[in-house]
Image (cartoon, grey):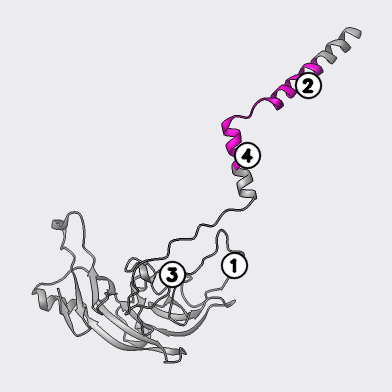
Amino acid sequence: MKKRAILLAFIISAVAMTSGCSANEPKTDEVKQEQTKTESVSSGVTIKPLTQKAIDENPYMAKNDANIHHDCYNSDSTDEVLPVGIYPEINVSYEKVNPNASPAVFFDNYGHSVVPLLGGLAIRDINAEETQTIGYFSPKQHDGGGYVIQSSYSFVDENNRLVCPTSNNHVLMLKATDEEGNVLPEFEKVLDIDIKAAAEAITGKTLDQNLLSVVFDYEGNLWFATGGFRIYPERQQQGAMGYISEMRSTQF
């Protein structure tokens, strides 16, 4: 019995000595880096401001988040301060009109949210408990149907009009608000250009590719591009691009 007690005391002593040695061992670089990282996070992340854009604003485009892809002009991406990390407030708005919730959103000059709706575009309150439509344009309801608006390549111009390419190769310009910024219940179509017909008249050939994207340059010319730009153009008809010069004539 006495021998067992001595053996047990020896084992406990050995374990204690081993633990003490490991606790006093010098920390490895990996452990030090992990500790530094933890201390840095706990003390707060230093916010490094982005360099302000050095690109002139396009006078024919709205100055805020007025398009979805932001692949037309860097000057049309926002300079506003955005939340760092997880935004502390989440608003849930239920969609009961569209088959799906709005997949994308951009904003007009008055801060109204512009979203796809029923094949067209609408200004909607997406912060309400139930998404509310304030004004809209539906090709089927307001223009005889047969096409939809390509919302991903639509944008807001300097006069707060919505410029929209369509699936039937037209470009529409919609007036969505009055001069005071009040939303019109039904958007007014103030311009409708058949890009495909104009392009075929100039090139003398039939275009198989659909209109894809439109954007204003710094001179007020409305540039457009079709699909069909690919690595192997001989496999199908090559795409086309051109511009409407000051909204009066079409050039290629």
Magenta region: which residues? Answer: 11-36
Task: Indicate which disc, 3 or 2, sits on the residue closer to the N terminus.
Answer: 2
Q: Which part of the image, by quadrant, shows the N terminus?
A: top right
SS type, badge 3:
loop
Q: Quadrant of residue 175?
A: bottom left
Name, please, the residue furthest toward the right.
2
Assess whether residue 13 is covered by the magenta stretch. Answer: yes
Residue displayed at 15% across by 56% down:
235
Name, please, the residue furthest toward the left.
204
Assess whether residue 135 is covered by the magenta stretch. Answer: no
* Circles 4 and 1 in contact, beta carbons < 8 Å: no
Task: Indicate which disc, 3 or 1, sits on the residue closer to the N terminus.
Answer: 3
Circle number at residue 35: 4
Majority SS type along the magenta span: helix
Residue pointed to by mark 3: 78
SS type, badge 4:
helix
